[in-house]
Amino acid sequence: MNKEDLYYIPAWEMKEKIIKQELTSEELTETIIERIEKINPIINAYCSTTFDLARDLAKKADTAIKKGEKLGLLHGIPTSIKDNVDVKGIRTTCGCKAFENYISTEDDIAVKRLKEAGVVILGKTNMPAFGYKGVTDNLIFGATKNPWHLERTPGGSTGGGAAATASGLSPLTQGSDGGGSIRIPSSFCGLYGIKPTFGRIPQKSMKIEGNMGTYVQKGPLVRHVKDAALFLDALVGADDIDRYSIPKPNYSFYDAIEEKPKKLKIGYAIDLGNLEVIHSEVEKSVLNAVKKFEEFNWSVEKSNINLLSIGHTIRGNVSIGNYGLTWYTIWTYGIGYFLKPIIEEFGSVMDQELVQMAQNGFQLTAENIYMAEIQREIIYDNVCRHFKEFDILITPTMACPAFELGVSSPTKIDGKEVSPGAYSPYTHPFNMSGHPAASIPCGWSKDGLPIGMQIVGKRFDEITVLQVSKAFEDVAPWQDKKPKFN
């Protein structure tokens, strides 16, 4: 096997080779470190590398095999960690100048579980300050570039991790998603990424982030669907650090992923009620992809889901004019009061777009916040009504392929002028509702950019989302395409 193949083989296959010692973790780690040293200066995916730690963990992984010790689910697999997640003894900046030199004093619960699973930590990946936007740049490390087109964004906020995995710099990437931060970069970078049901993976920050924290869930970005299932097996399960976290299921996502449901009713929608415009190439790719599910004798129908409608369970003088504004209201008041003391001390050196967002949160009234919370319940009600009729919801992941570097949002989509945020009308509703949602590559634009399709499931039904994703991967694989660097 040549090095080029080694960068991109599935993580589950890496694990098998490492356990059999057909390939040692140390050999694999050194090979990927060489790749990082060559490619990372081009795309700026890693903001902090931890090669000494990686070598130490790889050596321990190989030693454990030789001694016949119990092995973890991700034993010896090189992995990257998003720069808002603590790794003891390693710098964690959250992409913010206020934390430029902060060294974590303990491991995040997710990192503890990943270490217990046997991963090799290669470093921290780049992100926007506190993950506040869907592109990846900040005032410490600069912008991350999309490996498929170096003048385009990889998305965000897990943009560094997505660029790393797409480029063969990390077989597994740990990400987090509060409004699409796993699914946006997965779509833009040609990866599979899944945000599990809210509560599946504990969040230590819940106590300080308020309701903003009830949007956020950690999850994987990978090149192969089975790798995501393996990653989830290692991370899910309750912990007292997070009162919203739910118990570990009595089944394995990885073991169940190859099964295909005999009967399945899939509903698809191009507009959830808040669409300004969709790029013609995205719409065509998603509609063509949906038809492939008929190969499994599954029912495929257009869904009438509309997140702006008022369900019979909601009474009173309430309406939704824009579900994006509902998300934004709850997010800004949460991030505003979380960042208030930080802005008071460091505001002059922070990203001013983030500071303005926080200040917008300060100006919200109790009525604004209360109404947004009611509207959130309407959105949840409408998503659940869809799932009374269907098993799965399919939408585009994004309204367009990756747009140009240097802006937070495109001003035009497919030649039509749009408002800020119009590129992403599909992801954040499922942060508000808490349902599991994945993005899977389903096509390519004429410019050679990946296009993603979103697969949403019922609460706590990641298994069906993963099974549907694996079935699609089997009939429409994308991994033969790889970014090219001169």
Image (cartoon, rainbow, N blue to C red):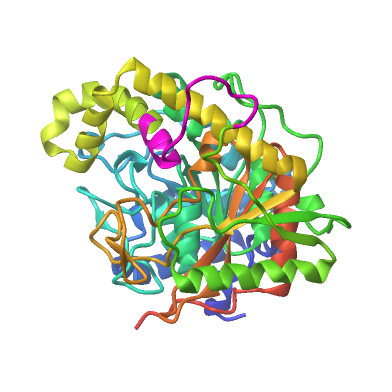
As drawn, is 448 to the left or to the right of 348?
right
Where residue 107 sits: x, y (%)? 47, 32
Q: Which residue is situated farthest in the front direction here?
A: 317
Q: Nearer the viewer, residue 169 or 448?
A: 448
Residue drawn at the location 48% of the way across and 74% of the way down: 281
- Quadrant where the C terminus sits is bottom left
Where residue 335 sits: x, y (%)? 33, 29
Q: Is residue 306 visible?
A: yes
Q: Is residue 241 above or below residue 175?
A: above
Residue drawn at the location 55% of the way across and 22% of the way down: 242
**Is residue 364 highlighted in magenta?**
no
The residue range painted magenta reads: 311-329
Q: Nearer the viewer, residue 233 or 438?
A: 438
Where residue 244 sits: x, y (%)? 59, 23
Q: Nearer the viewer, residue 240 or 285?
A: 285
Residue drawn at the location 42% of the way across and 36% of the way down: 327
- Quadrant where the N terminus sits is bottom right
As drawn, is 289 to the left or to the right of 83?
right
Residue drawn at the location 13% of the way across and 38% of the way down: 349
- Helix, strand or loop for the magenta stretch, by majority: loop
Q: Is residue 115 above or below residue 202?
A: below
**Is residue 315 highlighted in magenta?**
yes
**Image quarter for residue 288?**
bottom right
Where residue 261 sits: x, y (%)? 85, 55
Q: Which residue is situated farthest in the right direction here?
A: 262
Q: Is residue 476 above or below residue 69?
A: below
Q: Is residue 68 visible?
A: no
Q: Which residue is situated farthest in the top direction here?
A: 366
As drawn, is 227 to the left or to the right of 40?
right
Q: Is residue 384 above or below residue 341?
A: below
